[in-house]
Image: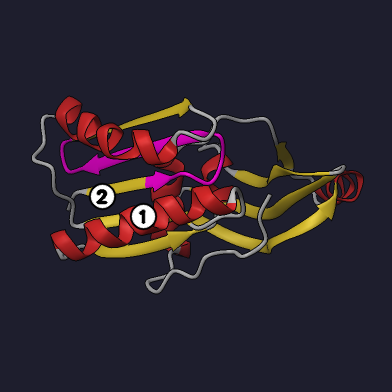
Amino acid sequence: MITLALDTSTPYLTLALHWPGGELESAERIERAHAERLPSGVEALFQDAGLELRADRIVIGMGPGSYTGVRIGASYALALARVWSAELTGVSTLCALLSEQPGTQAPALDARKDNVYGALYRVEASGVAELQAPAKYAQADFVALAQQQGAELRQETTPSGLSLIRAAQTLGRAQPQLHLSYL
């Protein structure tokens, strides 16, 4: 099964491919040029992997993040899923900030005015479990929550499309609903 992951809700264009023979990812900070760069980025990723431009499964980062960015990624993913007859799965964009290291992690994205969008996850070899759903917090409150839970704070981290794919294995939603709290 070939899986494509994409997220356009942050200033990064986050892409990844996973297939039986390997995996490949890219995350490039492009600010607000997602609409212009997404199609060519996906094509380049498949070309670099030596694969035909077609996936069996698409994982989309559903936000929180840029309202326009989330819509761009969701529209593109929905179109590809229909054209390719691919399964579409959604996970929180916060999952793109998780590392592969086992343990409790607290990913957060800037929500402006000393606020963050954050959540708590437990990362294990068997998958990712959501301990606390994504929500908006005062920055200081989220840092305190992470410390209280013994969680590794994951802010200012480059997103990973492969992290989205790993999280989708246990947290994926077959009928993705976008988070409607955006920057």
Report the residue at 77% width, 57% height from top: 136
Which residues fall within the magenta stretch? 6-21
Residue 46, above or below 85:
above
Report the residue at 73% width, 61% height from top: 135
- Compare residues 161 and 84 and report the one nearer the observer: 84
- Dot 2, how many residues are within 10 Å of its Cα: few (below 14), some (14-19), or many (20+)? many
Q: Is residue 126 visible?
A: no
Residue 169 magenta-highlighted: no
Element on which disc 1 rests: strand
Q: Which mark is residue 45?
A: none
- Dot 1, how many residues are within 10 Å of its Cα: few (below 14), some (14-19), or many (20+)? many
- Compare residues 146 and 133 and report the one nearer the observer: 133
Looking at the picture, the colour scheme in use is secondary structure
**Residue 104 at what x, y percent from top left?**
67, 48
- Compare residues 23 and 124 and report the one nearer the observer: 23
Q: In the rendered structure, which amino acid carries the disc numbered 2?
A: Thr
Direction from residue 180 to residue 12 in the image, left or right:
left
Q: In the rendered structure, which amino acid carries the disc numbered 1?
A: Val
Mark 1–mark 2 Cα distance, whole angstroms, equals 7 Å
Direction from residue 43 to residue 146 in the image, left or right:
right
Q: Which residue is mark 2?
A: 3
Q: Which residue is mark 1?
A: 59
Q: Earlier in the sequence, mark 1 or mark 2?
A: 2
Report the residue at 26% width, 60% height from top: 79
Report the residue at 30% width, 55% height from top: 58
Direction from residue 92 to residue 169 in the image, left or right:
left
**CB within 8 Å, label 1 to label 2:** yes
**Residue 160 at what x, y percent from top left?**
47, 36
**Residue 90 at what x, y percent from top left?**
43, 62
Q: Main secondary structure of the magenta part?
A: strand
